[in-house]
Every structure is written in C-alpha cells, then in structure tokens.
C-alpha cells in the first residue's frame, strides 16, 4: 500500500550518530557492542521514503541487528574520507557494501565534496582542456554536469567515462580493503550486472549504479566474501512508500518496498552461508500485519 502524506512532515528517520563521525545516519541507533551486520551504501541503503528498508528487513530475517550507515547520494569517497567509519567495521560480523555509482567520486577530471559526494566542487585543468567550451562554474551537482558533457560531445565524454570506471575500481578496492572483516558486495539495480556498458549506453538508460558493469565487479570478486545480485521483479511503482505530494517525483526514482524485500531475502541467504548465527526464515517470528507501522 502506498501512503501519501499531504502535509509537510514525512517519515521520521530517527537520525543518530555512531563513533566519532559527524555524519547523521538512519536510526534507531544500535548497540555496537552486540553482534551486528554493518550496511554501507547510498540512497537505497538509507531507505529514503520507506518505513523498513532492506537493512532492517535483513535483520528481521536473520535475527542479527543491522547498523545502517547508508547516506543519501554517497560515493566511496564519503567512507574513505572518514576513518572513524572504517573503525566501526572492526566490530561488525559482516559488512554489506552496496555497489555505488562511479559519478560521485573525485578523479583526475573533477573533485566532489568529501561528505556530499553528489556535489561537484571543481574541474581539473585536464577536464577544462578537453572541454574548453564549458563554463564549469554553472554546475553544482555531478549528474547535471555529466549529462551536459554527454550531450555536448559523446566522443569526448567517452574519455571521461573511461577514467571514472578506472577510478571506481581503484576506489572501491581501497574501500573494501579498509573494511575489517568479511564483505558482501550488493548489486541492487534495475539492470543485471551482465549488461555491457562498453557500447556507450546513454546515462539516461543505465540507471544506477552509473557507469558500473559486471566486468568491473569481477575485478573486485577476489576481495569480497560474496557478491549478491538483485534485479527486482517489482521495481516499478511506489508500493509501500511514504511521501508527500512534493516528494512524489523523487519517490518514483527509488526502489519500492517490494524491491527492498527481494534484496533483503537475497542478502539474508548469503548471510546464512557466512554466519552460523543467522536464522532460517522458518525459525524467525513472522511479521504480522498489525506490526507494520501505519501512517
């Protein structure tokens, strides 16, 4: 069921902090002294517009508490620039890392904000040389910038994309190496990993994770315990989402509750293979309809 709030107030994400990090994360805050699974990722991991995003659903299915460190529009740089977050992985039973897009990280061509990775900060001299006809002061967000550069010259844009892909593999490899303990890499997308992006698929057709494909994931497989792929069958629509009329357009760009349930089931299955303490579904109490928060 879709719940639409007509007033200005949306979901209460119960923001909280962990460790020495100044970032706010989605609550409720968990006790890091107890066994837990740590979740790193962007908007989908945070669970924008959802009462119960997939990290919480995984906790319900396995019986292991989830610590949700997802941040809206996060890239790998957000975690690598905050050593206190990497310290938190030492206490986790497993860390589930959602595959992040390649657009929101600093590279040879442009720099992003260290905490708000979707924010474009400045172009390098190299990018200004390639795109002499662009006024980069007009851009504040990476996706807006990249869409403009793609429209302006697909040939020059291909050079930029090649750099983003290489930078992504290196940076995600660094992030995985900085995580203490086993890592589950989670592909949660509208397209399968097997889709080949080498044919210069337009940005508008790719979906997230932007510019990332199976060949890039394969280069990371040896560094992680498992790769979990979810391409939800029920990815369209806003079923189970909570949003205001003003948020409707943004809500339609996110995975709905059914898609999150599919991803949670796949991750829970992987955790049962990796963690003896993870319970089988038939052993856990079923969620009753009257347990689900209503608006």
Image (cartoon, rainbow, N blue to C red):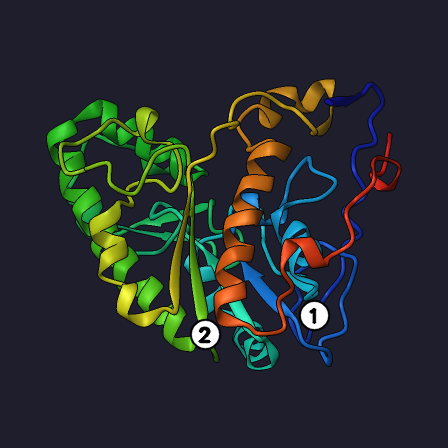
Q: Quadrant of residue 47?
A: top right
Q: Residue 97: x and y, percent?
A: 47, 60
Counting from the top left corner in percent of width and height, residue 180 is at 48, 80
Q: State which tag comes first along the sequence, 1 or 2.
A: 1
Identify the residue at image location x=53%, y=71%: 94
Disc sitting over residue 9 in the figure: none
Location of residue 82 with respect to 137 vertically, above or below: below
* Quarter placement of the C terminus: top right
Residue indicated by mark 1: 18
Residue lying at the far left in this picture: please name it: 155
State how far apart marks 1 and 2 are (Cα): 20 Å
Corner quadrant of residue 18? bottom right
Q: Is residue 21 visible?
A: yes
Q: In the displayed structure, does residue 23 sit left or right of residue 254?
A: right
Q: Position of residue 11 (x, y in %)?
A: 79, 37
Residue 267 in percent (x, y) is at 52, 54
Report the residue at 18% width, 35% height from top.
157
Q: Are marks 1 and 2 in contact (CB under 8 Å)?
A: no
Residue designated by label 2: 182
Give above or below for 19 relative to 106: below
Neighbour tally class for label 2: few under 14, some 14-19, many 20 plus, Cα within 10 Å: some
**Residue at image coords 60%, 31%:** 256
Residue 25 appears in the rendering: no
Secondary element under disc 1, as helix, strand or loop, is loop
- Image position of 203 with respect to 90: above or below: above
Say which of 89 and 192 sits in front: 192
């Amino acid at each position: 069921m879709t719940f639409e709030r007509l007033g200005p107030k949306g979901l209460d994400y119960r923001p909280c902090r962990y460790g020495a990090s100044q970032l706010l994360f989605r609550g409720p805050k968990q006790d890091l002294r107890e066994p837990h699974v740590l979740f790193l990722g962007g908007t989908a991991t945070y669970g924008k517009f959802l009462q119960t995003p997939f990290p919480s659903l995984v906790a319900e299915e396995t019986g292991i508490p989830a610590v949700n460190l997802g941040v809206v529009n996060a890239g790998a740089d957000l975690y690598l620039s905050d050593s206190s977050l990497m310290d938190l992985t030492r206490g986790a039973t497993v860390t589930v890392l959602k595959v992040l897009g390649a657009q929101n990280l600093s590279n040879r061509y442009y720099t992003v904000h260290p905490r708000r990775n979707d924010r474009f900060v400045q172009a390098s001299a190299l990018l200004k040389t390639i795109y002499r006809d662009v006024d980069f002061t007009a851009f504040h967000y990476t996706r807006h910038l990249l869409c403009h550069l793609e429209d302006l010259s697909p040939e020059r844009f291909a050079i930029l994309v090649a750099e983003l892909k290489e930078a992504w593999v290196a940076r995600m490899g660094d992030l995985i190496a900085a995580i203490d303990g086993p890592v589950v890499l989670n592909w949660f997308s509208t397209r399968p990993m097997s889709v080949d992006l080498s044919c210069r698929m337009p940005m508008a057709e790719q979906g997230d994770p932007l510019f990332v494909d199976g060949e890039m994931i394969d280069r990371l497989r040896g560094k992680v315990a498992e790769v979990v792929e979810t391409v939800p069958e029920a990815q369209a629509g806003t079923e189970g989402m909570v949003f205001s009329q003003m948020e409707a357009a943004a809500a339609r760009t996110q995975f709905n509750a059914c898609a999150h349930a599919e991803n949670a089931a796949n991750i829970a299955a992987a955790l049962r293979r990796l963690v003896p303490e993870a319970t089988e579904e038939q052993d856990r109490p079923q969620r009753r309809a009257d347990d689900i928060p209503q608006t």
